[in-house]
Image (spheres, rainbow, N blue to C red):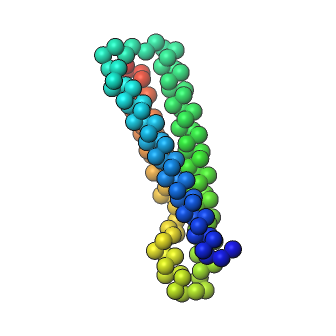
Amino acid sequence: MNSKELLDIYFKLTDRFDFLWNFYTFFIIALGSYFLSNKSDLVLASTDRIVLLTGYLLFVSMNVGALFITIKALQAVADAIYRVTETAPDEFTLICVLVRRSHSLYKVATIVVHSVMFCLIAGLVILW
């Protein structure tokens, strides 16, 4: 594979990564809107709370799994791009601007954001 094909794959994976975060954000906004719109008369039975938390936990686990798979693929493609372009200094300079060398911070951010939101939503569901 040449560097152009690898860059195309890299940017498609980046688009998938962005889509997964946008999907998660939409889900959180929808869930928050549900809580805020029914604030006065929202009384959840214990079974409803369990169903809501279980559904959220399933959604989060699928989202985190998909994000981790995408991050792993991004890292592999980025490494391949750097290996292919090391011999061409002009391309290598451009690649350094376009492609991140490490994606490990993405995993940390994914875990932190999903954990904090789970704690907030669990707190809302339990306290409501």
- Report if residue 57 is visible in the image: yes
Name the residue furthest left: 40
Q: Residue at x 59, y 40 (%)?
A: 62
- State the quadrant of the C terminus: top left
Where is residue 4 drawn, in percent x and y? 60, 74
Q: Residue at x 50, y 68 (%)?
A: 100
Where is residue 45 drawn, in percent x and y? 46, 12
**Please, is residue 21 above or below residue 127 in the view?**
below
- Report if residue 107 is visible in the image: no
Q: Residue at x 50, y 26 (%)?
A: 53
Name the residue furthest right: 1
Where is residue 80 drawn, in percent x and y? 63, 71
- State the quadrant of the N terminus: bottom right
**Please, is residue 111 above or below residue 58 in the view?**
below
Left or right of residue 4, residue 111 in this image: left
Q: Residue at x 42, y 21 (%)?
A: 126
Where is residue 94 drawn, in percent x and y? 49, 79
**Please, is residue 14 above or below residue 64 in the view?**
below
The total number of labels drawn is: 0
104 or 16: nearer the viewer: 16
Quadrant of res 82:
bottom right
